[in-house]
């Protein structure tokens, strides 16, 4: 919850979080002041899309509560007071809450749009989908190869060229059909088609339990290739995650839980067990996400 600092309403102070008394999710929250009852009517939709509402007497009435890993105010965070201030949760849409009029907002804030959507061109939308959406393979090609009669082993060095929806490319080895290779080995001069399957490594699934936003990076250390794995600890839906898990291994397989990856995990930046500090001597704490 935020409160405007002045009449221009271009700068705000954070009042704190509001506990609406629900555990089923809060989306599209709105608040309207009921001048007759002299209180706020707050409405929202839960995780299933069901309309909910409650009342709040004073949204600016706050208190400090102890919050896990909160680095400010000696670990205390501002909340809107619940007891005697927030009413019971009701099902159904609140009749007093309509679509807010944001027509004057753009006049006060440069480049502001009175909506949560932004219109873009079809070309931009396609580019964003390719760049940020799920990447899929869009093509596979193999260049023609000339081999010496009865010497098909040279095909093992031939790789398939792959193209992807985001514009990137790669190359992978191919497992050629054994029967096709056998026929080619005894064939005379000519042009032949050999089929095969692009070689793709299969890894344990799930690879790392309760590890969201995973990222792997290959690097060399002392002329030896190693793999870095970093992720978000999502054990409790990342509520006040107290550390940043990191793993390092010589192979990708060794990073997986089923191969022992959890046992080599480094418990980085854990406020409770490590007490890592900044250059100024402050304890590094907060809620961590894997980059």
Image (cartoon, rainbow, N blue to C red):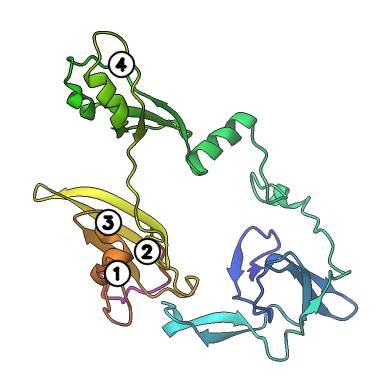
Label of residue 262 in the image: 1
Question: Can you tell which of label 4 and label 2 is closer to the viewer?
Answer: 4
Q: Which residue is mark 2?
A: 208
Structural distance between the alpha carbons of marks 3 and 4:
33 Å
Picture residue at 23% right of the left edge, 14% below the top: 146
SS category of the residue bearing label 1:
helix
Residue extending furthest right?
36
Q: Are marks 2 and 1 in contact (CB under 8 Å)?
A: yes
Q: Which residues are magenta?
A: 282-286
Counting residues from the start of the chain, the first of labels 2 and 1 encountered is 2
- Horizontal relation, residue 198 to residue 147: left or right: right
Structural distance between the alpha carbons of marks 4 and 2:
40 Å
| Neighbour tally class for label 1: few under 14, some 14-19, many 20 plus, Cα within 10 Å | some
Structural distance between the alpha carbons of marks 3 and 1:
12 Å
Q: Are marks 3 and 4 in contact (CB under 8 Å)?
A: no
In the rendered image, which quarter is residue 185 located in? top left
In depth, the one of 240 and 118 nearer the eye is 240
Label of residue 144 in the image: 4
The spot of residue 157 in percent (x, y) is: 21, 28
The spot of residue 21 in percent (x, y) is: 68, 82
Q: Which residue is mark 3?
A: 253
Q: Are marks 4 and 2 in contact (CB under 8 Å)?
A: no
In the rendered image, which quarter is residue 234 located in? bottom left
Question: Can you tell which of label 3 and label 1 is closer to the viewer?
Answer: 3
| Neighbour tally class for label 2: few under 14, some 14-19, many 20 plus, Cα within 10 Å | some
Give the vertical position of 251 relative to 263 (above or below).
above
In depth, the one of 218 and 287 nearer the eye is 218
Structural distance between the alpha carbons of marks 2 and 1:
8 Å
| Neighbour tally class for label 4: few under 14, some 14-19, many 20 plus, Cα within 10 Å | few
Picture residue at 24% right of the left edge, 10% below the top: 188
């Amino acid at each position: 919850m935020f409160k405007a600092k002045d009449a221009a309403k271009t700068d705000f102070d954070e009042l704190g979080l509001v506990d609406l008394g629900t555990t089923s999710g809060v989306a599209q929250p709105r608040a309207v002041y009921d001048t007759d009852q002299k209180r706020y009517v707050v409405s929202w939709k839960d995780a299933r899309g069901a309309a909910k509402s409650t009342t709040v007497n004073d949204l600016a009435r706050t208190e400090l509560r102890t919050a896990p890993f909160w680095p400010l105010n000696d670990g205390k965070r501002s909340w809107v007071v619940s007891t005697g201030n927030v009413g019971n949760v009701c099902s159904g849409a609140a009749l007093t809450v309509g679509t807010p009029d944001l027509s004057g907002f753009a006049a006060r804030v440069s480049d502001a749009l009175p909506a949560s959507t932004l219109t873009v061109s079809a070309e931009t939308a396609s580019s964003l989908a390719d760049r940020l959406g799920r990447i899929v393979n869009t093509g596979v090609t193999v260049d023609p190869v000339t081999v010496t009669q009865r010497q098909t082993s040279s095909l093992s060095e031939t790789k398939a060229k792959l193209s992807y929806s985001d514009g990137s490319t790669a190359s992978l080895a191919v497992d050629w059909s054994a029967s096709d290779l056998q026929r080619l080995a005894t064939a005379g001069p000519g042009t032949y088609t050999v089929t095969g399957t692009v070689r793709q490594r299969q890894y344990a699934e799930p690879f790392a339990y309760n590890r969201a936003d995973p990222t792997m990076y290959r690097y060399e250390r002392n002329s030896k290739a190693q793999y870095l794995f970093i992720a978000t600890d999502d054990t409790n839906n990342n509520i006040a995650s107290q550390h940043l898990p990191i793993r390092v291994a010589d192979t990708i397989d060794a990073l997986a839980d089923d191969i022992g990856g959890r046992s080599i995990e480094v418990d980085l930046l854990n406020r409770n067990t490590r007490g890592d500090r900044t250059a100024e001597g402050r304890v590094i704490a907060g809620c961590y996400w894997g980059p």
